[in-house]
Image (cartoon, helix red, strand yellow):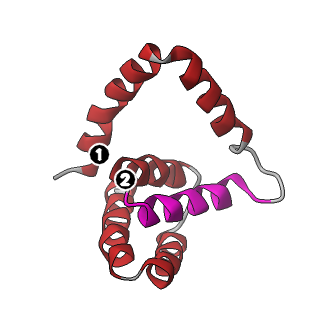
Amino acid sequence: MSYKATLTAMKPQVKSFNTAIADTAQGFGAIAKSVSNDGALTHKAKELIALGIAVAIRCEPCILFHTEALVRLGATREEIAETLAVCVEMGGGPGVMYGTKALAAFDEFSA
């Protein structure tokens, strides 16, 4: 299974869904944009938090979107791994299983 292929296949589906719920998607997009800048936390730090939450709630598509963003933002494998270690601390076994997916996705997106 390729995480890149999975994410590539999802993007048109997300776009189609967003078109179907245009007002809601526009509101959600505004929320996403409001946290995508540096503030008290850097954009990268916010994406690391988002990745941690994605792992904690076991949302594989969220893991892929946030991991791809972290690669674009220059996150290191060590930063990803440390974020995932916190997920394991807070989430136990599921943190291990979904953390594994997140690290594999990072490796694939970074290649």
> Residue at point 39% right, 75% down?
95
What amino acid type is highlighted by mark number 2? Phe
Residue 67, image quadrant: bottom left
Residue 49, above or below 97? above
Marks 2/1 in contact by CB < 8 Å: the verdict is: yes
Q: Say which residue label 1 marks.
A: 4
Q: Residues within 10 Å of mark 2 (few under 14, many from 20)?
A: some
Sequence-wise first label, 2 or 1: 1
Q: Is residue 6 left or right of residue 71?
A: left
Task: Give, as a single range, the part of the protein colored magenta.
Answer: 41-58
Q: Which mark is residue 109?
A: 2
> Residue at point 53% right, 79% down?
86
Where does residue 6 sit, x and y in percent of width and height?
25, 42
Q: Residues within 10 Å of mark 1 (few under 14, many from 20)?
A: some
Residue 47 is covered by the magenta coloring: yes
> Residue at point 74% right, 57% down?
42
